[in-house]
Image: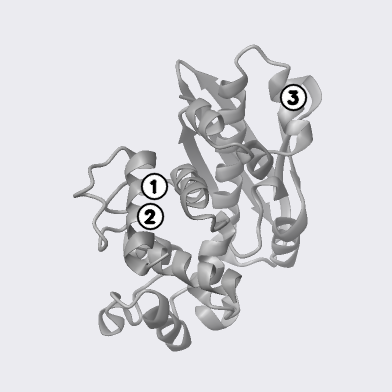
Amino acid sequence: MSQTQTLSAVQEAVVGALGVSEDEASPDATLMDDLGAESIDLLDILFRIERSTGVKIQASDLSEYIQGGISDDEFSDENEIISEKGLDQLKKVMPQIDADEQRGNLHAENVIKLFTVQNLADMVDERAGSAAS
Amino acid sequence: MERLVSENAGILDVLFTTQEQDYCRGKRRVHDHLAGRFAAKEAVLKALGTGIAQRMLWTDVEIVPGSRGRPEVCLHGEVAAWAEKRGLADVDVSLAHSAGMAVAQALAVWDREAEDSRSGRERSVAVSPD
């Protein structure tokens, strides 16, 4: 499956689960803040993606993918503000994030709110590649 | 919840333990009860200050009927380990469902030595059974 096909499958899942238009489910739309997805909607989206692509992703995989194996203590400081190491990781999986703008301001629990349709498509691609290799 | 369950085979096992499923199947409004339990799980996770974070499963938070029908929380797996590490003393939950809406509220009580910011954290969550 090409990256374009994966993005289309993710957008189709988002439209079906959230009842938003195809235009609204644009690659740069954030799932939670822009499209109003809640955790139960994320589950619906992930199940739809599994049906259409065969790639199985659990809800808990999202945070694991975002943190990239970095421990909670390294990913954010004692006030749960994303650390420099955490920002470096976010640049890899959520490249749209402006690290300079978020430095010292981004709370760990708000990271998922910045996760976009494209970020999810990239994750599906990564998982599909891992499964194939 | 009804749509989610009907459209996604296997999702019940992802969200609910066998005991939770058996309890809800014994009720007339099955999906209302499932939605109430899901809302309770979310409320508990928010009260703990985590989401469904790394390696955590929805079934790690189990809502079981306690004495006189009062719901009680049993933590398992990664969620139990996470809560123990941070000094969770107790977690209480209440839930209700009516007129197509389920709501739940959870209160986490932390040991005195736990971080001040987590003391008495309380969260409410509403989930539609439809």
Query: Where is B57 relative to A111, above or below?
Result: above
Percent of width and height locating residue B98: 50, 17
Which label was assigned to residue B21?
none
What secondary structure is found at the residue carrying circle 1? helix
Which label was assigned to residue A13?
1
The chain holding disc 1 is A
Q: Is residue B65 left or right of residue A60?
A: right
Q: Mark 2, residues whose alpha carbon is within 10 Å: few (<14), some, or many (≥20)? A: many
Q: Is residue B76 left or right of residue B43?
A: right
Q: In terms of depth relative to the viewer, which is nearer, B79 or A59?
A: A59
Percent of width and height locating residue A17: 39, 40
Measured in 3D between alpha carbons, the distance from the residue under mark 3 to the one under mark 1, in whole angstroms, is 31 Å
Task: Read off the residue under disc 2.
Answer: A10
Q: Amino acid at mark 3?
A: Tyr
Q: How is the image coloured?
A: one colour
The chain holding disc 3 is B
Does the CB distance between marks 2 and 1 fall below 8 Å? yes
